[in-house]
Amino acid sequence: MSINIISLASYFAIMCFALGCLVCTIRIVKGPSPQDRAWALDAMYINAMLLIITLGILFRTSWYYDIALLIALFGFVGTAALAKFLLRGEVIEP
């Protein structure tokens, strides 16, 4: 099995994104304020999305891109709802 430059770069990127997810997890647990935790959660879903896209490049299949798109959509909606909750104290207004 020969390893080319794309494989090496993919493995390096996977390690970097996994490390980013680990750092965000630490910030979510230890965050001094709810805003820090929300920001870490936002960065974590972006790192997870990029990790899955990198896996799609490494394994040369398109299934991973669909999963990454779903993570991006749910992450954006979750971040917007969390920001509204932190500002007003409720997500759905009466």
Image (spheres, rainbow, N blue to C red):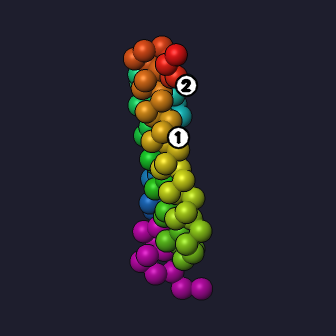
Give the mark, 1 or 2, whose residue is nearer the N terminus.
1
Residue at 57% x, 75% y is: 61
**Residue type highlighted by circle 1:** Leu
In the rendered image of this protein, does residue 84 appear above or below residue 56?
A: above
Q: Is residue 51 visible?
A: no
Q: Residue at 52%, 40% (x, y): give it.
A: 22
Q: Secondary structure at mark 2?
A: helix
The residue sitting at the front extreme is: 94
Which residue: 48% across, 50% down? Answer: 72
Q: Please report contact status of discs 1 and 2: CB closer than 8 Å, yes or no.
A: no
Which label belongs to residue 40?
none
| Residue 57, placed above or below residue 93 | below
* Residue 48 place in picture, x, y as percent: 51, 50
Q: How many marks?
A: 2
Q: Is residue 6 magenta?
A: yes
The secondary structure that dominates the magenta segment is helix
Q: Position of residue 25 (x, y in %)?
A: 53, 34
Please give the label number shown on residue 29.
Answer: 2
Q: Give the residue type that dot 2 points to.
A: Val
Q: Quadrant of residue 76?
A: top left
- Left or right: residue 74 versus residue 84 is right
Residue 89 lies in the magenta-colored region: no
Q: Which residues are magenta?
A: 1-11
Q: Which disc is residue 22 wearing? A: 1
Alpha carbon separation for disc pair 1 and 2: 11 Å
Whether residue 59 is visible, yes or no, is yes
x, y (%) of residue 59? 57, 74
- Quarter of the image with the N terminus is bottom right
